[in-house]
Image (cartoon, coloured by chain):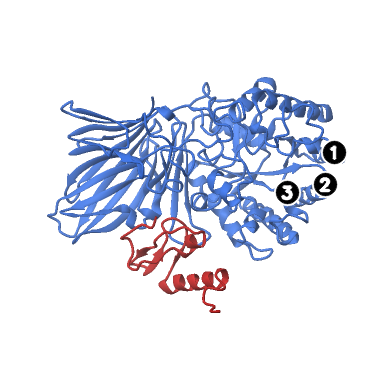
Chain colours: A blue, B red
Amino acid sequence: MSKMYVNVIHRADRGASMLEGIKFQQDEAHRAGIRTTILLSYEGLCDPDMVAYVKTQMGLGDEIGIHFHNMMCEEMLPYAESDEQALYLHSFSSKKKIVDRIFEVFQAEFGFVPTAIGGYIMDTETTLYIKEKYPQVKTSITNCFEEGVKMFEGNNGSWYLFSDGGPWGAFYPSKYHYLAPGRDKESSIDLVALPHLNRDMVLALTSRDDYFSSHPANVMRAKANDGPNSPYMHRFVDQWIEQKNYNGFSYYNVFVSTPWVVPGNIFVDNFEHARALYIDSLQYLKGKAEQGEVEFVTMSEFADFYKTEIGAGAAEVNLWKDILAGTKRQTFWYADSYFRAAIDLNIGGVICDFRPYVGELSGDTGPDTDILWNGNYPYVIAREHRGHSGHRCVIKYGDASASIEGKRAKGRIERTHDGKQQLVVEPISIQVGDLEVTLESAFTFTGDGRILIERRVLELSDPTAEITLTEVLDGCYGTTVYPEDMRGIELTVLSHQEEKHTIPFTYRSKEARVAAPTEVKAVIPQIRTQLSLTPEGEADWGSVKEGVLFKPYYKLTLEKKVQLGGVLSSWLNVEKR
Amino acid sequence: MAQRGKTMKLLLCPSCFAREIDYLLAYDEEEDEYYCQRCCYAGKEENVLEFYKVFRNEKYKLYNVTY
């Protein structure tokens, strides 16, 4: 029976209040039969009372490691190059000194090198350095899924953490970007990357996902609780358990740092309610463990499982429904080492977010890097940031046309006969002029940088009608809500007759169109990526079009005339350029 | 920008509007329900109008006060 593996993680910080808080958390975890992973911050390591307490917990079988938050304090200033509070925003030389100092103090106190570590962001150069110097490390919390622009705006520009565009679960990180999975053992860092919390996979795109995570006090911050009760939190756990049916396992972590369960947190209107919600979360998970659906493990134990059973380069999917507002909304996610894709079923099955990892960009941050603070992985589609972007299907009949976006759809995950992950969008009926069209869509993820997209016409209100199906990709690139410079992008369309047109992007709304296309593509040198659509079999027309400054997108299309029972099959491909 | 032509009535999403974002609600004929394609709001016409009213009364306290 597949399981959801659960880590309960506590951070040990400095001070009497933090000590009282972690004692509460540890006692409650033990009461639920859970062995925890305690990650000590540098401040915690500098507190003799905290270190003494953590040693008692180690004696009870809990795992002890390092967390790189709360490291900037008086005792660190002699080692760091600035008083920057975030490790990932230091220069590489400063990162190394900070890391070494913390490992040194940890080893002096505990007598060993920890195998579990974590931070809010652990960029590639830092992780590579740690693995080289401390090869015993097996696992690290490396990223905060989809925390980026919206979170920054929501917290009044006070929290410089941009970690948007990576996987949501466990993965082996590549050697180039901390958010991009490695393709195989050779191209990966030998360490299992874990997310800082699980997130609500619908609200991750439509809302601030730090509000809606596996952190009951964050849910309280969102006011999605009623005093000490939050049925939403139970549904949240259930949704994550369901993911094991699609992937063979599921990973979940509860990581509430102590400031959330002691008095004085400005986001917690009643700390006793925060404690009650914390207890309730652990007890609910305990109940699921008793039913055999959940297994509690330490971070390093999970890393051992992942290394043995899953390995580098594995694909993961997620199908999530709206469990807060209760609407029909569903979002599907897919991630592997080539790309991450999200499909919004609330708009008929539009690809609403797409991050091509093939460009092998660097994600290292700090004052000595080009990207400074911006650890987001670039998108080519991100509807939440750039509303016009997306990949959709448009149906034309005579002079009328309609997009799948106008219909709410429902999806299900299947496996092809050769084991590939597939999202089937259940049939939707779309009115196109006076014709009603029933269309089924399927997305097959072949694990090699391609998605096979099939549109099947199941019904027509006039069975003799002929319609045109068009795949439309409106793309761009960027990491925030603002457009980037599109000059340098080249759009090309190729035909079976070897007709070829290339349009350099100059914001002049130029377009090229050919019959019997073999490929329509955009080469985006800024992210070393080529994005293309290619027909599987035949298509009638293909086109590329550049946008203008008021609408700075490129458009790729493939179209085909079909009748009842007809199919348009095409590939969405990403390649390194 | 608001998205044109999706709805039976032109109703802005009240939840997005509360964040000062203009987004027209789409209409689900089968459910006789308006829903937002941007956020997770869904409701009947009367729910939408009531949301506007609460928002206006709580935020624009002087909007209907004459001096």
- How crowded pointer 1 is (Cα within 10 Å; few <14, some 14-19, many 20+) is rated as some
Q: Which residue is mark 2?
A: A19
- How crowded pointer 3 is (Cα within 10 Å; few <14, some 14-19, many 20+) is rated as some
Q: Earlier in the sequence, mark 3 or mark 1?
A: 3
Disc 2 is placed on an element classified as helix
Q: Is residue A31 left or right of residue A413?
A: right
- How crowded pointer 2 is (Cα within 10 Å; few <14, some 14-19, many 20+) is rated as many
Q: Which residue is mark 1?
A: A47
Q: Earlier in the sequence, mark 2 or mark 3?
A: 2
Which residue is more in the foreground, A18 or A36? A18
Disc 3 is placed on an element classified as loop
Labels 2, 3: front one: 2
Real-space Cα distance between discs 1 and 2?
A: 10 Å
Q: Position of residue A519 (x, y in %)?
A: 26, 31
Real-space Cα distance between discs 2 and 3?
A: 21 Å
Image vertical order of residue A492 relative to residue A385, above or below: above
Q: Which mark is residue A369?
A: none
Q: Position of residue A231 (x, y in %)?
A: 60, 62
Image vertical order of residue A516 relative to residue A568, above or below: above
For the C terminus of chain A, the quadrant is top left
Residue plotted at (18% across, 29% down)? A496
Residue A267 seen from this side:
yes
Q: In the rendered structure, are the residues bearing label 1 and label 2 in contact, judged by CB atoms less than 8 Å apart?
A: yes
User: In the figure, residue A476 lies in which quadrant?
Assistant: top left
Q: Name the residue type under label 1.
A: Asp
